[in-house]
Amino acid sequence: MTSYFNEMYHDQAVRPPYARLQNWVQSMPAELRQMKQAEAEALFRRIGITFAVYGEGGDPDRLIPFDMFPRVFSGAEWSRLERGIKQRARALNAFLVDVYGRGEIVRAGRIPGRLVYQNEAYEKAVVGIVPPKGVYSHIVGIDLVRTGPDDFFVLEDNCRTPSGVSYMLENREIMMRMFPDIFRENRIEPVEQYPAALRRTLASVAPQKCDREPTVVILTPGHFNSAYYEHSFLADLMGVELVEGQDLFVEGEFVFMRTTEGPKRVDVIYRRIDDAFIDPLCFRPDSMLGIPGLMDVYRSGGVAICSAPGAGVADDKAVYTYVPEMIRFYLGEEPLLQNVPTWQCGKADDLKYVLEHLAELVVKEVHGSGGYGMLVGPKSTKDQVENFRARILADPGNYIAQPTLALSTTPTFVEEGVAPRHVDLRPYCLVGERIELVPGGLTRVALTEGSLVVNSSQGGGVKDTWVLAE
């Protein structure tokens, strides 16, 4: 049986970051816990924090399960993670500027050209464009897992529009409201400055033609989108307008927003829609979500788009395997955070190994997300494994495989009381004129006993993430 690192208990003792939580949980009667859990759910429902699950009958909007037992990092642990995350964000942005420019990393033979230039996320329309301040990915969500006291691995990079930050903020808000005493007893770093930091980051990459205080907007596909709550939540906290494509138009060298007082020029668009839909004159002609002519304005330096079109090539799961090489190539440094060992099924030797060990591995589509399109070998039936084998053989280059990691566990409130459940972490790294990281992130928890899949779309929940002040 696999043994997992428990973040609260190690060698039969409570680890220091969790020292003050032991009494808190032991002194909480079951009735109080159930009452508080119901209170948390009522708050989430009242605020309207839901996420959408498509393709299932009935009302697709669901309440995300919230676990009241916080996950805790010491200041020293966080400091190490922060350095590694910022290093990775710098390298990913350097890679994007390079591959849409001279392509030095490909010329040097450090990454195969086909993985970049034949990648469906590589946007030929932005070749030769250097976005303001040389930043392609302004919000980098780096998914991390832990396997031991000092062992952290990067599971994947999200360079386009990483979601979930609203949960990070609301988890904290609800915990502070329900348990003010434990916040008085523990010196916990705040996360509520994130919206102000995001606005500052976006304003810092205003285009060259902006000669005044930048006007920032959030572009949403609309209220049917699964993350619409987050779009409106962030717009509200940042004090910026939430717009849809029909609210914006291009005139001359600029983008304007329709307002009751007439057109208003827009300088920075934080877009939460995919590349394919942002400009029907450049990408998908049938898109009703974008702004015709937006890319011409972007090319001429009249507007900044965050994250920049084309950023998705950096979070492809096959490209991910080369991020340590990017860090060495662009920064001249050794990676501070390790990748999970990864086999690329597009390589003959890797494919052979994967097919021979399919029942032991986790296999993912290179463009997959949300826990879909993946196989968790040890948790799958023989039929599921064989079906997946056929899918891999039909298109090997579309898959990567990784070992089944012994993800760490944290105490979690379940029906019977408190039990360990597997977790991951998504911190949000802001990249503009400078790189900022709020101390914390979104901890996702696999609520099903033994499950390693933490995605909310697959039944996972969320919990507050604490970083203790040094």
Image (cartoon, rainbow, N blue to C red):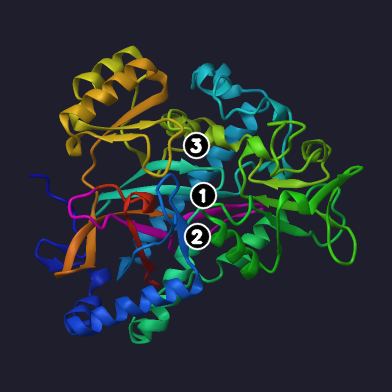
Q: CA distance from mark 1 to mark 2?
A: 8 Å
| Residue kind at label 3, given as amino acid type | Asp
Tell me what residue is drawn at x 61 percent, y 41 percent.
Answer: 274
Q: Nearer the viewer, residue 59 or 331?
A: 59
In this rendering, is residue 167 above or below 39? above
Q: Residue furthest front?
A: 58
Tell me what residue is drawn at x 36 percent, y 59 percent.
Answer: 443
Tell me the magenta residue range: 427-451
| Residue kind at label 1, given as amino acid type | Pro
- Which label was assigned to residue 165? 2
Identify the element where label 3 is drawn: helix
User: How many neighbours does mark 3 have within 10 angstroms: few (below 14), some (14-19), or many (20 or more)?
Assistant: many
Viewed as shown, does residue 344 lie left or right of 243?
Answer: left
Residue 439 painted magenta:
yes
In this rendering, is residue 364 above or below 163? above
In this rendering, is residue 405 above or below 183? above
- The answer to whether residue 130 of the structure is visible from this angle is yes
Q: Are marks 1 and 2 in contact (CB under 8 Å)?
A: yes
**Residue 353, picture quadrant:** top left
**Which comes before the other along the chain, label 3 or label 2?**
2
**Residue 461 in the image: x percent, y percent?**
34, 60
Tell me what residue is drawn at x 55 percent, y 62 percent.
Answer: 229
**Residue 434 in the image: x percent, y percent?**
63, 54
Q: Residue furthest top?
A: 348
- Which label was assigned to residue 315? 3
User: How many neighbours does mark 1 have within 10 angstroms: few (below 14), some (14-19), or many (20 or more)?
Assistant: some
In this rendering, is residue 469 above or below 307? below
- Which label was assigned to residue 162? 1
| Residue kind at label 2, given as amino acid type | Val
* Quadrant of the frame with the N terminus: top left
Tell me what residue is drawn at x 44 percent, y 54 percent.
Answer: 60
